Image: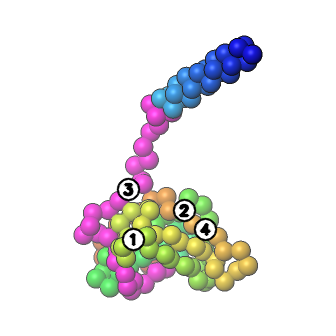
């Protein structure tokens, strides 16, 4: 009966060493994504929103009543231009980064699509006007 326990202990130790080695390697090899960032508090978009515009299947433009604007880029297509989207704030009613809001696209369809925000890009008032004209 000793051998199975030793084998199991040996296997557990080997798996632990491999797991630690993999974690250390993946952390060392991991490169930060420069696009995933939070904006400064002065650039956050706050509720109530003045306007939300679906630019394309994976881009959302938000403008609040104070004139602050953000472009939110999703990891994949999850919205349709003329369909409603659902936004649920996490904690506060401000959007400063990718994790501040849950977005669900195409909520009027049978299967709504959950959006995952990849990047948040602040825009000046001039950039907002140019962005709306271009799209």
Is residue 35 part of the magenta span, yes or no? Answer: yes
Q: Which residue is mark 4?
A: 114
Q: Which residue is mark 3?
A: 37
- Which of the numbered marks, if any, corresponds to residue 3? none
Check contact, mark 4 vs mark 2: CB within 8 A: yes
In this rendering, the label closer to the viewer, 4 or 3: 4
* Residue found at the very far front of the displayed protein: 1
Give the Cα distance between marks 4 and 3: 20 Å
Give the Cα distance between marks 1 and 2: 17 Å
Check contact, mark 3 vs mark 2: CB within 8 A: no
- Where does residue 46 sit, x and y in percent of width and height? 34, 77
- Where does residue 109 sit, x and y in percent of width and height? 70, 80
Disc on the earlier residue, 4 or 3? 3
Q: Which residues are magenta?
A: 26-53
Q: Is residue 70 visible?
A: no
Give the Cα distance between marks 4 and 2: 7 Å
Q: Which residue is mark 2?
A: 116
- Which of the numbered marks, if any, corresponds to residue 91? 1
Check contact, mark 4 vs mark 3: CB within 8 A: no
């Amino acid at each position: 009966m000793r051998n199975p326990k030793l084998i199991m202990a040996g296997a557990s130790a080997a798996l632990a060493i491999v797991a630690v080695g993999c974690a250390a390697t993946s952390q060392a090899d991991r490169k930060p994504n420069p696009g995933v960032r939070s904006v400064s508090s002065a650039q956050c978009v706050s509720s109530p929103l003045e306007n939300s515009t679906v630019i394309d299947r994976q881009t959302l433009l938000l403008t609040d009543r104070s004139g602050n604007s953000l472009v939110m880029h999703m990891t994949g297509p999850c919205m349709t231009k003329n369909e409603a989207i659902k936004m649920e704030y996490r904690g506060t009613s401000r959007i400063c980064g990718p994790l501040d809001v849950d977005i669900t696209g195409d909520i009027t369809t049978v299967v709504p699509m959950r959006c995952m925000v990849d990047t948040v890009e602040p825009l000046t008032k001039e950039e907002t006007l140019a962005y709306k004209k271009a799209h």
